[in-house]
Image: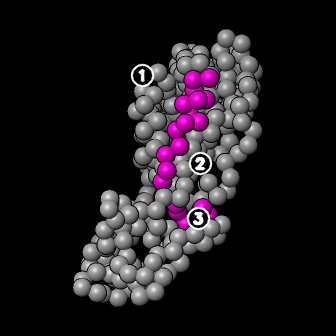
Amino acid sequence: MPKSKRAQVVSLTKVTKKTREQKGALIQEIQQNAEKWEYCWLFEVGNMRNAHLKTVRKLWKDSARMFFGRGAVMAKALGTTPDEECRTGVHKLAKQIKGQVGIFFTNSEPEEVTAWFDDFHPDDFARAGNRATRTIVLPEGPVLQYHSVPPEPFPHNEEPQLRKLGLRTVMKKGVPTLEAPHQLCEEGKTLTPEQAQLLKLIGEKMVEFRVRLRARWDASSGEVVQVDSSEISPDERAGDVVDEAAADDAMFLS
C-alpha cells in the first residue's frame, strides 16, 4: 500500500539555505561599504540578544553600517590575503573573523566609537548555562513579580507553572504563596533551565548585553589596530541563540 502523503513530519525549524546569488550580493554589499567608510571594526557579542542588536542598528543607522553572522562570507568579501583583499590592509582584519563576530563600518572617530560601546550594556535575563551573579531567595508569602512597581503577586492561573518550575506553592486567597523561603539560585552556580525561567518570570535580570570591539582597520593607513585581545567568556556565550531570520535581518543594518 502506498505511503499516505498526509502522514509526513514537517520541521518548523527548517531554514532555506542561501543561494549563490544571495551570497554574491552580500559579498558585493560588504565590499561597497569597505570602499565607502573610513573605519571597519571587528566586534564580538556577549549575552547575545537580537533585540539589543537591533537597538544598536537603530541608534547608528545614520552614521554606520553593521554586518553580523556568516563569518565565512564576510571574510571572503574583505579578502583574507593581500591578493584577495578589497582594500589595502583589510585582509589582516578578515583573517580574524572566526566564530560569532561581526563587522562595523563607520566614519566616526575611534574614541567616539569605543566610548559609545563601553557605555552600551543593557541588562537582560539570564539563560540556562549562565552563572548566577547573586543569590536570590524568595521569601515566605505571596510569590511576587518585580516587573511592576510596586511588585504584584502572580495571578492564580500561573500557579501550576510555578510548581512545575520547582516552587512549592499553595493557593491562599487565590494567590500562589510560599509557606517557607525558597532559594531560587546561588551566586556563582550555573543556572538550570527552570531557574532561568523563574528569574525571568519574577523579573530578575542577571546578565549584560555587550558589544566587545576586538580590532579596527583604518582606511587611511591600511593598518589594523588590536583593541581588545580578550574573548567573550564561555559564560557570556551560554544560551546564545541567533535564529536565521534575525541573523538575516542583522546582516543589513543601515
Label whose residue precedes the other's in the sequence (2 or 3) = 2
Q: Is residue 242 above or below residue 39?
A: below
Label 2: which residue?
46
* Residue kind at label 1, given as amino acid type: Asp
Where in the figure is residue 60, as x and y percent of width and height? 45, 28
Where in the figure is residue 47, as x and y percent of width and height? 56, 51
Magenta highlight range: 111-134
Q: Quadrant of the N terminus?
A: bottom left
Residue 57 in view of the camera: yes
| Whether label 3 touches label 1, CB < 8 Å | no
- Element type where label 3 sits in the image: loop
Of labels 2 and 3, the one closer to you? 3
* Residue kind at label 3, given as amino acid type: Arg
Residue that appears at 62% across and 39% down: 212
Labelled disc at residue 62: 1
Label 3: which residue?
134
Label whose residue precedes the other's in the sequence (3 or 1) = 1
Residue that appears at 43% across and 82% down: 140
Residue that appears at 53% across and 43% down: 121
Label whose residue precedes the other's in the sequence (2 or 1) = 2
